[in-house]
Image (spheres, coloured by chain):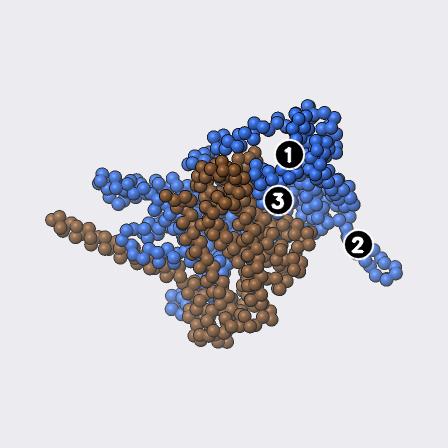
Amino acid sequence: MSNQLTKADVARKKQKNPDSLLSALQNGGPVVWLSCLIMGLGNIAAGQIVKGIIFLAIEIVFFAFMFMQGGGISNLSMLPSLGDRPMQEVWNDEEGIYEYVMGDQSLLILLFGVATVFAIGLFIVLWRASVRSGYKALCIKKAGKKPWSFIKDIKELFDSNIHKFLMLVPFGGILVFTIVPLVYMICMAFTDYSTINDKLILFDWVGLDNFKQLFQSGGAIAGQFWDVLGWTLVWAFFATFLNFFLGTFVALIINRPTTHFKGLWRTIFSLTIAIPQFVSLLLINSMFRENGIVNSLFQQWGWIDTALPFLTKTNWARTFVIVVNLWVGIPYTIMQVTGILQNIPSDLYEAARIDGANAVQQFMNITLPYMIFVLTPYIISSFTGNINNFNVIYLLTGGGPNPELQSAGKTDLLVTWLFKLTMNEQKYNLGAVIGILTFVILAVVSLVTYRSSGSYKDEEGFK
Amino acid sequence: MAKKSTGSIRAQRLTVDIIVHTILIIMAVIWLIPFVYIAAQSFRGGVNLGMFSSTFFPKVWTFDNYIKLFTDTTSLDFFGMFKNTFIIACCTCCISTFVVLAVSYCMSRLKWKMRKPYMNMSMVIGLFPGFMSMVAIYYLLKTMGLTEGPMIPVALIVCYTSGCGMGFHVMKGYMDTIPKALDEAAYLDGATKWQTFIRITLPLCKPMIVYQIITSFMGPWCDFVMAKLIVGAEAKYYTVAIGLWRMLEKEFVGNWFTRFCSGSVLIAIPISILYIITQRFYQEAMSGSVKG
């Protein structure tokens, strides 16, 4: 890595003072210690007035937020109980009616609590930066040099510190709209926020109860969970490998030297990718319904007497989604494999031909090993992608057929069941548990495979 | 003898050719059936405009569905939806293209302390099912006051762009192929990193930028889950995807199925064209950044 640093980088690195927080606290004088309480003091003392004032302003805003009415402190103090005042009816004497007084809303308490925890974390990072920056500026001043002016700081934001400038917006977006919601939903898995016992407004922490419910043998939810998990894995296996082998087969026969109209075939197959899935899959769903066009045509032609239960019988529906997924997935494989086939060095084949290898031998000994080598990461990611394949299942069958009194349908994957649990049934806690378990499954699959693959260990190997 | 064997090889090859082409034709027909069906249904006229017709091709051909789609705006305003989606897609594509470029540049060209942790973080987050945090995002946007009235498009733009800082892999892979020597030459000439980014790296990424622009432009046209959750019942702010989805719901499908087909055709044509363009640029990009 070091050989990739430019000379300028190296020079800058040498200039840098040893300015960790620890050394700042050990070696810094009273001003640095005081700047732990009053942020920005070190910078102001060293002459970096604007920077110091910005740090101070951040501190003031943070503490104002923490101590104001309904601010940080009150959010945190409500977090352990998640609120306990229910909505109340109060008799209003003047108007002669009952008025509703808002009680606590656990949902918002949890949300604000999580947000406050993140705000505190962010503040600690800034606090650490301010102490270090003050110490560094004082050291430079002590050495008789002038610390960076504010304008210089701004200029460096476009040069040596450009990563701070460029990453600010992207990372902020991820923090607020991905990480905070994710942590919030993970917390949800440890509460009883669901329609059961009417816990939609006020709910409590319940520890690991939801997980227990899911793994309890004989429980109603547990049975559905194992059923769905089993089908998810079966689905992911078939969807990945059938697509891969059939797609490779089609790509190979398109790629044969004597096959005509190569471009035409590829365009036709890529149409499936180009057209939004919710259009094509909803349409296929309507074609295969009990009175859809497929059944009615088959009946007109006299092939069948009663409608085929494509979507209403478990095994029919499961086969149906796997087959339709071939229609969706083969084009993707064709696209991937075509690119790779064109990259196989042609001298390998020439050498094989000179040695007298026939087409089958060439395929088994050159094409196949090469493809498997290059495509292993693709197969893994399509396996994990299929575990999370929401569109195909949701649009084709909606998870159905649905057995009575069960929330999980017979073709539901973990993701679609999660979606149903949260959106339709409002059992948010169970949805969150399923989300966490999906994560665990995916993490295990990818850790085992990615970690052992060359591309992870040696990210920059090809340079 | 020798002649005979080449002849039999030729005959063998011809049989294989015929088999291969037959397989391809059959497959192509299967692949095209749904698209032919939807195009045919979009011209279906007559009394029954619902989902179920007994013939593959319509008995009565008409152009009415397309006309009505734009003129009958009392319950679902297709042109309005088109406009909404177009605006959202344009904003999304500007923001996310810049964000992806910035993040990829930081990941590929700069060495900084949090680089590897950031990449690991984005990998771990990617393993959580996206639908899990959807409800939380909705409440977050609601407390910010973005889920009502004219702020709805803003909320959707925020949704589509907030996560794009994690979609840097393809672009980073491309930037990795640009020789580092170019950057170093620029530094020696006194360029700052910002100038190097704008003047050296970005122009070399052109094919990949086009790819990125088009893919992020297409996103909002295809998303129906998040959009449905955020827009809710406010028909004025429907995007095309929700609109088409609504047309298949019970209250509409009886009269709107053929119009759903024509709407789908109208959306599918531009998106397919864009997609084919993307593929051209993608292939160009994959063949390397600096040629010769």
N-terminal of the pair, mark 1 or mark 2, is 2
Colour that chain A carries in the picture: blue
Q: CA distance from mark 2 to mark 3?
A: 36 Å
Tag 2 secondary structure: strand
Identify residue type, mark 2: Val
Residue A364, given in percent of the width and then of the height, sits at 30, 42
Tag 3 secondary structure: helix
Which residue is disc 1 drawn over? A148
Q: Is residue A243 visible?
A: no
Identify residue type, mark 1: Trp
Q: Residues within 10 Å of mark 2 (few under 14, many from 20)?
A: few
Which residue is disc 2 drawn over? A101
Q: Nearer the viewer, mark 1 or mark 2?
A: 1
Q: CA distance from mark 1 to mark 3?
A: 26 Å
Q: Nearer the viewer, mark 1 or mark 3?
A: 1
Apparent side of residue B11 relative to residue B124 in the rendered image (left or right): left
Tag 1 secondary structure: loop
User: What's the mark number on residue A288?
Assistant: none
Q: Residue at x 63, y 38 (%)?
A: A153
N-terminal of the pair, mark 1 or mark 3, is 1
Residue A60, given in percent of the width and then of the height, sits at 75, 40
